[in-house]
Every structure is written in C-alpha cells, then in structure tokens.
C-alpha cells in the first residue's frame, strides 16, 4: 500500500469536511438563525446546534493536522517552509493552528463559559458571525493557494 497516497486522501477528506463545515455554519446556519430566531435567542440556539457537531470539527482538524504532518515528514518537505514561493504551506499551518487552538483550548476552557454568561447575546452573535466570515475567507484563500501551489500555479 502507498502510505503517501493514503495520507493525501485522508488529508483531502479531512479538509473537505473541516472547511465544508465552516462554510455550512457561516453561509447557511448563521444566516438562517439571523432570519428565524429573535436577536436575543440566536446565540443560545447556535450553541445548541454547535454542540452537536463540535466533536466532528475536532476530528477533522486532528486528521488534517496529522495527515499534513505525515505528508511533510514522509516527503521531506521541510525546506518549503524556508522558501517564500511556498507561502501557502505557511498559511495551511497557520490556519490549522488557529482552528486547533479555538476547538481544543479557547472554546472549551473559556468561550463556552463566557457565552453562557453573555450580557449581550446579540452583539456576541454578530461578532461570532464576523469571525466565521473572516475564517471562511482565509480558509478559501488557503485552499486556493494549496491546490494551485501544489499543481504549479505559483
């Protein structure tokens, strides 16, 4: 069996579900909550729904990170991190770190408690929406760079 091909397949599937989930939350779930829930109820409703798929996001982020690391180690791609032409490699790692910190550290240790005691759920929901929009734009840019870069576009 070709471990490199398997790792690449796992990596692509993990990124698909991870960033696809971010896209769904940002472009479908949050706008739906904005139009169907009262402003003061949006944050609570979002947290109820988010609790059902948080474990999936953690799984996909872990698989993307582990398979990405395996690909770098197996193909000895470390030198790419010293070359500005491979900017998309840096962006992939940076994006992964942001999501890993959010999903495994910030949310469980701080954010869930803070949002449960929110004094302004409307403002918190709006802030969370903007953050998701920004992360989706960065994610799409990263995917464009990674796919284009790995196929000689850059």
Image: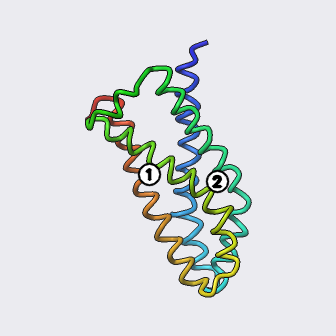
Element class at badge 1: helix
Residue 128 location in percent, x, y?
53, 71
From the viewer's perspective, is 105 left or right of 86?
right
- When the figure is inspected, residue 63 is found, relative to residue 1, above or below; the finding is below
**Closer to the camera in the image, 20 or 64:** 64
Residue 101 location in percent, x, y?
57, 54
Q: Residues within 10 Å of mark 2 (few under 14, many from 20)?
A: few
**Closer to the camera in the image, 6 or 88:** 88
The quadrant where residue 119 appears: bottom right
**Closer to the camera in the image, 29 or 125:** 125
- When the figure is inspected, residue 1 is found, relative to residue 95, above or below; the finding is above
Name the residue at 54% across, 27% down. 70
Name the residue at 63% across, 69% down. 111
Read off the residue under disc 2.
104
Which sits earlier in the primary sequence, circle 1 or circle 2?
A: 2
Read off the residue under disc 1.
139
The quadrant where residue 87 appears: top left
- Name the image quarter holding the C terminus: top left
- When the figure is inspected, residue 146 is found, relative to residue 105, above or below; the finding is above
Residue 66 location in percent, x, y?
58, 34
Residue 20 location in percent, x, y?
54, 50
Q: Residues within 10 Å of mark 1 (few under 14, many from 20)?
A: many
């Amino acid at each position: 069996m070709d471990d490199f091909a398997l790792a690449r397949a796992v990596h692509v599937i993990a990124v698909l579900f991870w960033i696809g989930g971010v896209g769904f939350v940002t472009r479908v779930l949050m706008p739906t909550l904005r139009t169907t829930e009262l402003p003061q109820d949006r944050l609570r409703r979002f947290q109820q729904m988010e609790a059902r798929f948080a474990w999936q996001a953690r799984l996909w982020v872990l698989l993307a990170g582990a398979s990405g690391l395996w690909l770098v180690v197996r193909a000895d791609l470390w030198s790419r991190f010293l070359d500005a032409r491979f900017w998309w490699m840096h962006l992939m790692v940076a994006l992964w770190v942001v999501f890993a910190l959010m999903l495994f550290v910030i949310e469980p240790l701080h954010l869930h408690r803070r949002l449960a005691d929110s004094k302004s759920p409307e403002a918190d929901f709006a802030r969370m929406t903007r953050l998701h929009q920004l992360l989706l734009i960065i994610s799409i840019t990263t995917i464009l760079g990674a796919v284009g870069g790995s196929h000689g576009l850059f």
